Image (tube, helix red, strand yellow):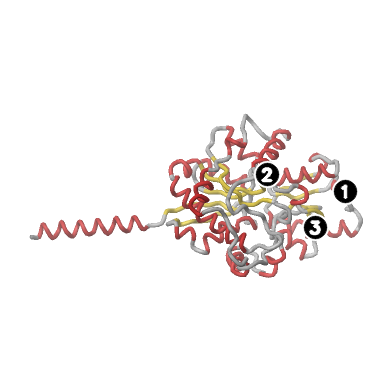
Amino acid sequence: MKSACFRLFSATCLALASLACAAAPTAVRVGLVNSSSDVGFLIADKKGYFRDEGLDVAFTPFDSAAKMVAPLGAGHLDVGGGSPSAGLYNAIARGISIKIVADKGSTPTGYGYQPLLVRKDLVDGGRFKTLKDLKGMKIAGSAPGSASTSTMNEMLKKAGLKTADVERVYMGFPQHVLALQNGAVDAALTTEPSATRAIQSGAAVKVLGDDEAYPDHQLAVVLYSGPFAREKPEVARKFMRAYLRGVRDYNDALKDGRLVGPGSDEIIGILTAATPLKDAATYRVISANGCNPNGSVHEASLRNDLQFFKDEGLIQGEVSVEQAVDNSFVEAAVKELGPYARRSGQ
């Protein structure tokens, strides 16, 4: 009798342990760059979409996506979000498995979220009048070989200038504001909300939107590490479903390139809680980033950037955009969620 009771007890404990294991969320490690294009991740986290999929997501901040390449390649990060860089393509050329899997931030007309800023004193004093006056200036950017360097190239081309005609200084986006304020740089290609903070402080003037200089630029992407995509495909699909739900809520809250549409108060509340910027009014005036609610990336833009990186001598080895992009995860998510349709009444 005791033996039977013991066996029943043991079986019950095992069953309970199995249920506990089944209910335990799956950890997913995500790298962020502290820019406005993190919004899809933040919404999915705060509204419980990751949790709904049984995921326990942990965020780690980086100065740029270029610095995520090594931990993604080593499998120390599962997901990354930021600029598709020359470093990313070089890693892929070396056989390191990292994939571009979704849009995170792009620049359709009206969504220029990484504008060119010039110090206000240089504008007021007449040193800067047109884009040609960028020649010889010290311009802040995020990282060498990042997608924003291609944006800068497109802007310089409009003035008949080359990248060698300016001096680039690289630092995290929030540092751009201080650098403009103390005169350490003359201009900056700065993502939101840092761009608006620099303008509001009186340190800088917006002179050109990146949506004007480079429309539909694929400025930020979602990256999957090879081990995550290959060894945990179902978890990767769950992550994408949750992420796109967040992106769709974001798109619902947009109106005319600003976070002023229906539901925007909730989205701004999430941003003020999750980011260093706590002023809700600022989020209502910044230029919002575009982000495809169906997830797919602008491959023509990626090809243009890759060619620029090659022309600059930044690419070592043979690599193509087709090698870098994996559309299967957004395709699976859209198949299950359905194509995006703006909510009724919005």
Give, as a three-letter code, the residue at label 1.
Asp
Determine which quarter of the picture holds residue 41: bottom right
Q: With 173 as the anchor, is 25 left or right in this view?
A: left
The residue that appears at 80% across and 59% down in the rendered structure is 204
Rendered position, 162 above or below 220: above
Q: Which residue is mark 1?
A: 133
Judged from the image, the secondary structure of the residue bearing numbered disc 3 is strand
Give, as a three-letter code, the residue at label 2.
Ser
Q: Which residue is mark 2?
A: 146
The tally of labels here is: 3
The CA span between labels 1 and 3 is: 14 Å
What x and y, as percent, mark residue 261? 65, 66
Label 3 vs 2, first from the N-terminus = 2
Outermost residue to the right: 126
What x and y, as percent, mark residue 85? 65, 42
Give, as a three-letter code, the residue at label 3.
Lys
Q: With 160 as the anchor, is 44 left or right in this view?
A: left
The CA span between labels 1 and 2 is: 23 Å
Q: Which residue is mark 3?
A: 206
Label 1 vs 3, first from the N-terminus = 1
What x and y, as percent, mark residue 341? 58, 58
